[in-house]
Structures are given as structure tokens and as C-alpha cells.
Image: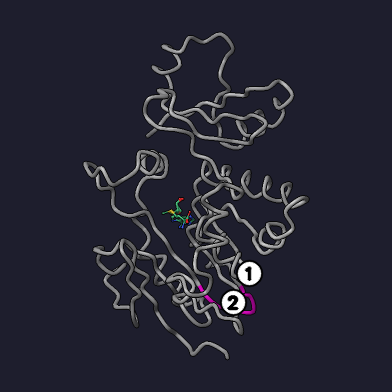
Amino acid sequence: MSTIVINCKNSQLSNQADELAEALDYPILSAGLSLEVKQRMFDYELVVDHQGISLLPTNAKLHGAIRCDFSSAAHVHRRKHGGGNGQAIAKAIGVSGRFMPSVLDLTAGLGADGFVLASLGCSMTLIERNKVVHSLLRDGLERARQAAMTDTALGSIVERISLVGQDSKEFLESLSPGDRPDIVYIDPMFPERKKSAKVKKEMQAFHSIVGSDDDSADLLSLALDHAKYRVVVKRSVSAEALGNLTPSYSLTGRSTRFDVFALNRLPN
Ligand SMILES: C[S@@+](CC[C@H](N)C(=O)[O-])C[C@H]1O[C@@H](n2cnc3c(N)ncnc32)[C@H](O)[C@@H]1O
């Protein structure tokens, strides 16, 4: 298990850092601690500064910052040139000009997939149980809401996103029948490929914070009881079907596969 400390870089933000420390039950970095001692005591620091919250290894050589930034060049490029409703994720969900479903994303992570679907018009509810990841995502959404003052397109996307910090199994179990989402989306952590150079260092770090989602097959069986039209599971191309349940069909790309469990015909 990784050890984490909160590092407040600006005294004006100390209230925010205190709230984060209390919510996550992590210590605040003491002033004057040497780098050597910091590295011995902690694997990661959650840095609070004017750019928001970022997760950094205390050994800066390991990898760069992990943060949630919906205004980043990668997100802007995907939004503008990602292929719209022709993207595999959009086809799997069933988004079209006529149908912009409500989607319950049971495994929000840093919200990349949720943001793509919201940018295509879906109403997204994102659920994340890991408190560190939830804090990074909540911070990213807050900053996107602020940026929306000058970027109205971004504003209308984030308006379609709501975030819940909870285990999705509990969320589904307490869902009333009238609130069933059109589509349920699940993207559990891929099994860790320790020695693969293909796994980016940031992804390995994410793995060490979140662990592996060993209960994701249970999530799928619950999801099948709660979705109106479909459950969509994102897998790596070579992974076995989640819970060994056979999907209705799959959409396979270069590295990712979307397994679609069709429950009812989509409305026209
Ligand atoms: C692979 S990541 C999802 C990445 C996300 N699709 C994206 O585009 O950024 C999986 C995330 O699901 C979360 N997760 C797994 N099982 C969960 C559950 N039962 N309830 C809530 N969150 C869960 C993990 O904590 C992790 O952050």
C-alpha cells in the first residue's frame, strides 16, 4: 500500500489542504522536512497549488504528475477530432443524434471516458470509490466549471456530469426503480502487466494507489439488473470476458474492446 502525504504549496490554500487531509486521513507535510526523509516516509504527495490537486511520486524521477485536467491538449483534441458518434465507445453505448442516454459510469477513475460521453451529449453520473482518485476527479471537474466561464462548450459538457464518491455496488443496491439509468458502463482496472514497457509509468502508479478491481464481476451482475437498455464493459483486447459472461457482441479496436450486454432495444 502506498503512503501519501498532503503538500500545500501556498499558504492561501491551507484550508483546502486541511480539508483534503481530513477527508483522506493523510498527514500534511511538515515544513523543513528534508527530501531524503520525505522520500523515506512517503511514496506519493498530493500537491495542492493554484493549478489544483496533483499526485506526484516523492521520487520525481519515477514519473510526472497525475491530475485531472479537462482543458488539457489531449482532452481538447479528443473532443474536437475524436470521431464523434463514430467512436467505438459511442457505438457501444448507443449514442446517436436521436438518442443521448443517461449513463451510469460505475468506475469513473479520472473521468476520461465519462467526459468523452458527456461531450457527445450523454447525461453522466460518475461513481468513484477510491478517495484519492475521487479527490483528483472532483478537483478536475471544479476547475472545468471555472474554465467554463470563458469556454462555454466546456461548460455545457461539465453541466451534464455529476460525481458520487461511493462504492458502486452500494449505489446500485440503493437505486430506486424509477431512477434506472439507460446504460451502465464499467471499466475496471486491467490486470497489471508488470514488466510491460507499454504500461505507462503513470498507469503503474494509478495501479499502486487503486489496486486491482477484483470485485468487478459482481459489479457486472448487479449492473445487468439495473440498466434499462445496455451494460457496456471496457476490456483490453486480449482479456477474457468479465465474469466469464458472454456479451451480446463486442466492438474491438487496436488495444481496447467494448463488450455490449444488450438488454432491450434502444429507443429510436
Ligand atoms: C480503469 S479505472 C477507470 C478509468 C476511467 N474509465 C477513465 O476513463 O478515466 C477504474 C476505476 O474504477 C474504480 N472502481 C472500481 N470498482 C469500483 C466500485 N465498485 N465502485 C466505485 N469505483 C470503483 C477504481 O477505483 C478506479 O479508479
Question: Quick one: SS at disc 1?
Answer: strand
Residue at the limit of the structure toward the left, as seen here: 195
Which residue does the image show at 58% across and 22% down from the upper left? 28
Relative to 159, is 103 on the left or the right? left
Q: Position of residue 143 (x, y in %)?
A: 68, 45
Please tell me which residue is depicted at 41% across the width and 26% down the height of the picture.
Answer: 43
Cα–Cα gap, marks 2 and 1: 6 Å
Please tell me whether residue 177 belongs to the stretch shown in magenta: yes
Question: At which x and y percent is residue 218?
Answer: 38, 65
Task: Tell me the colour scheme of the image.
Answer: one colour
Which mark, by number, is residue 262? none
Determine whether the beta carbon of the residue marked 1 sits less than 8 angstroms from the nearest atom of ligand 1: no
- Residue 119 at x, y = what percent? 60, 65
**Residue drawn where x is 67% and y is 64% of the image:** 160
**Amino acid bearing label 2:** Pro
What residue would you read off at disc 2? 101
**Looking at mark 2, is its residue's CB closer than 8 Å to ligand 1?**
no
**Location of residue 208 with respect to 152 vertically, above or below:** above
Specify which label sits upstream in the sequence, 2 or 1.
Answer: 2
* Residue 39 percent coordinates (x, y): 41, 18
Q: Tell me the quarter of the picture where residue 125 sits.
A: bottom right
Circle 1 packing at 10 Å, graded few (<14), some (14-19), many (20+), is many
25 sits left or right of 243 in the view: right
Give the amino acid type for the residue marked by disc 1 in the picture. Answer: Ser
SS type, badge 2: loop
For residue 123, the mark is 1
Which span of residues is magenta-colored? 176-183
Tell me where residue 263 sits by quadrant: bottom left
